[in-house]
């Protein structure tokens, strides 16, 4: 057992799926999934399109009801939440989407402030915390712009700022690099790693083998709704992990293959220095 | 006012500014509906007033006595009437008093009555009723009494007038209810278009953890603001129109029906209250209905 695995096991359990099944009629979303995620972990959720990754996230966010099983989050059962409790549950997590999901009619500042407004933070705290958050993600001085005036990478950084402004214990990132060029993708990964180092648990859905393999974090591979592999410091080999019948889509092969190799090495070596 | 409310109002105003064409269309529709509604309201209030007037004018029965009936016998009859629940009060009207009253009514032509050598009018008991609907029972009792010559009561006229005013009231109420439903549909469709354009935004808000009421707030304010603006415009128009009608035809109306329009101040104050309440309700209900489908999902 590696040192990292031992350290992880000492940490407090924050998410636990217990025999979770979600069907869409005849089709499987996730089937009999059981998994434990501890506080401070960085977990990659990998698998081909339609494997069940989105379902895995959606049942955690209570966007979908499970058919069987339970999902425990911190100290309550997500599957038992009442409708009026769902907003409070979601506020305790940060969510980053592949399409950024920014509010187009709100400025950069207002987008981040919005997440604080809905938890009824006082105006004073909002005025103080939002600029600090924008600075953390490298968007200082951009508060007055609208999302459409930002580059793609900046938009994703803004989405991350909004997701972490309330200091969530868990950050869920659904293919946050999916729409980004490789270079920007790595910028986002650096940011997520920085957030993870501050203690935030990160659950990231990705198709990018290059990112997964370079980061050396815990990898949960899903195929046909079932967990087929779960290992810390694992690798992701799409051809091997994903459906051998060729279900693996072109989109899934999004990777950083054209990525400037030098830059990737620089990132990895920087990471090494940080650690 | 708390921050959330101010924020909702600001957002509602911004939203209205962004959808000028739709806002103008719905504002026009709601104002038109409220205008018609206001006119029916005025009609209803005046008809109701008229109906009360008719009831108070005709809520008495005149019991004419035989010439042979003495004053003491008349007092006994009066006591019998006073014992009845339906009766408010009973007065004795001597034939001389009746003639004097007649002269007052004839006004400038009263001198014609001076030529009478004999007073043709009978002594009478005037029975005032609590409720005009009880008149028939009282008339039947009076007719059976000893010493009574005849019972005078304009039953047919009263019945006709009451059924006409009741009919007008029912029609006006049905139309008001219909117009209210139409205006709620107009507002909800306008807001639905705004909501459709912002469906994605609403979904994002839900994912971030905004409650349904937080999301609904600005739309609700938008509906209420639209309703209030329409109420103000139509309120001013209907009030001015009523002022004009009262000034122009009030006297004629008084001459013909012997009763006036409902007082302007009273009616306009009530109209303002009704319109403000309606504006808020139409806007609020319209926006809640329009958002139901979008907020029902997880």
Image: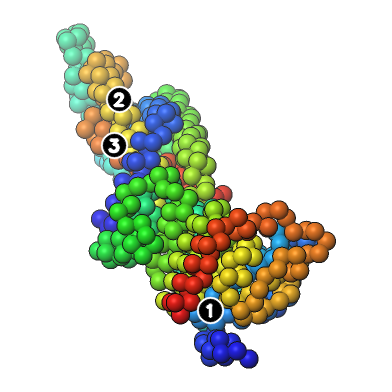
Q: Position of residue A270 (x, y in %)?
A: 46, 72
Q: Which residue is mark 1?
A: A41
Mark 3 or mark 2: name the one nearer the start of the chain: 2
Other-residue count near label 3 (Cα within 10 Å), few / some / many at <14 / 14–19 / ≥20: some
Nearest-to-viewer mark from 3 and 1: 1
Q: Name above or below for residue B266 compared with residue A130.
A: above
Describe the element under mark 1 as helix, strand or loop: loop
**Chain for numbered disc 3:** B
Q: Name above or below for residue A160 compared with residue B186.
A: below
Of the 4 image quadrants, the one containing the N terminus of chain B is: bottom left
Q: Which mark is residue B24?
A: none
Nearest-to-viewer mark from 1 and 2: 1
Q: Which colour assignment does the render follow?
A: rainbow
Q: Position of residue B89 (x, y in %)?
A: 28, 42
Identify the residue at horizontal 27%, vertical 16% (top origin): B249
Q: Position of residue B182 (x, y in %)?
A: 50, 34
Q: Name above or below for residue A154 compared with residue B278.
A: below
Identify the residue at horizontal 63%, vertical 74% (top origin): A219
Q: Looking at the rendering, which quadrant does residue B132 occupy?
A: top left
Other-residue count near label 1 (Cα within 10 Å), few / some / many at <14 / 14–19 / ≥20: many
């Amino acid at each position: 057992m590696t040192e990292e695995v031992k350290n992880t096991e000492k940490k407090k359990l924050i998410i636990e799926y217990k025999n979770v099944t979600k069907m869409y009629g005849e089709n499987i979303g996730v089937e009999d999934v059981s998994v434990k995620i501890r506080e401070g972990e960085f977990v990659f959720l990998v698998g081909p399109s339609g494997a069940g990754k989105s379902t895995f996230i959606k049942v955690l966010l209570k966007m979908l009801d499970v058919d069987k099983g339970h999902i425990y989050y911190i100290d309550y059962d997500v599957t038992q939440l009442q409708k009026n409790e769902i907003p409070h549950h979601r506020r305790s997590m940060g969510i980053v989407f592949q399409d950024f999901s920014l509010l187009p009619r709100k400025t950069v500042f207002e987008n981040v402030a919005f997440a604080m407004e809905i938890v009824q933070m006082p105006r004073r705290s909002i005025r103080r915390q939002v600029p600090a958050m924008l600075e953390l993600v490298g968007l200082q001085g951009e508060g007055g712009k609208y999302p459409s005036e930002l580059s793609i990478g900046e938009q994703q950084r803004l989405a991350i700022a909004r997701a972490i402004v309330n200091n969530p214990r868990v950050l869920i990132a659904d293919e946050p690099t999916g729409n980004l060029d490789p270079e920007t993708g790595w910028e986002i990964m650096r940011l997520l790693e920085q957030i993870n180092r501050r203690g935030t648990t990160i659950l990231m859905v990705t198709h990018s083998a290059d990112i997964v393999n370079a980061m050396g974090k815990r990898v949960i591979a899903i195929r046909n709704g079932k967990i087929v592999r779960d290992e810390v410091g694992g690798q992701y080999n799409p051809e091997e992990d994903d459906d051998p019948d060729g279900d693996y889509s072109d989109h899934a092969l999004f990777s950083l293959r054209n990525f400037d190799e030098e830059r990737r090495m620089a990132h990895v070596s920087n990471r090494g220095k940080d650690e | 006012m708390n921050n959330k409310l101010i924020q909702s109002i600001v957002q509602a105003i911004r939203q209205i500014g962004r959808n000028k064409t739709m806002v103008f269309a719905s504002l026009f529709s709601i104002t038109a509906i409220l205008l018609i509604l206001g006119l029916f309201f005025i009609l209803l209030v005046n008809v109701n007033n008229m109906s009360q007037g008719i009831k108070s004018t005709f809520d008495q029965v005149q019991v004419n006595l035989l010439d042979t009936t003495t004053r003491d016998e008349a007092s006994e009859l009066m006591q019998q009437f006073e014992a009845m629940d339906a009766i408010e009060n009973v007065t004795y009207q001597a034939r001389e008093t009746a003639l004097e009253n007649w002269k007052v009514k004839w006004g400038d032509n009263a001198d014609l009555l001076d030529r009478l050598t004999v007073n043709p009018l009978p002594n009478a008991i005037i029975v005032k009723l609590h409720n005009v609907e009880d008149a028939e029972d009282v008339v039947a009792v009076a007719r059976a009494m000893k010493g009574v010559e005849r019972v005078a009561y304009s039953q047919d006229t009263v019945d006709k007038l009451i059924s006409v005013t009741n009919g007008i009231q029912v029609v006006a109420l049905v139309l008001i209810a219909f117009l209210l439903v139409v205006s709620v549909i107009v507002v909800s469709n306008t807001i639905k278009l705004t909501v459709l354009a912002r469906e994605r935004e609403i979904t994002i808000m839900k994912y971030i953890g905004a409650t349904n009421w937080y999301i609904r707030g600005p739309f609700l304010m938008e509906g209420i603001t639209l309703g209030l603006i329409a109420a103000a415009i139509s309120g001013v128009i209907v009030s001015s129109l009523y002022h004009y009608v009262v000034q122009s035809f009030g006297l004629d109306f008084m001459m013909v029906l012997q009763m006036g329009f409902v007082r302007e101040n009273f009616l306009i104050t009530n109209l303002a209250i009704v319109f403000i309440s309606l504006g808020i309700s139409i806007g609020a209900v319209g926006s809640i209905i329009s958002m139901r489908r979008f907020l029902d999902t997880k």
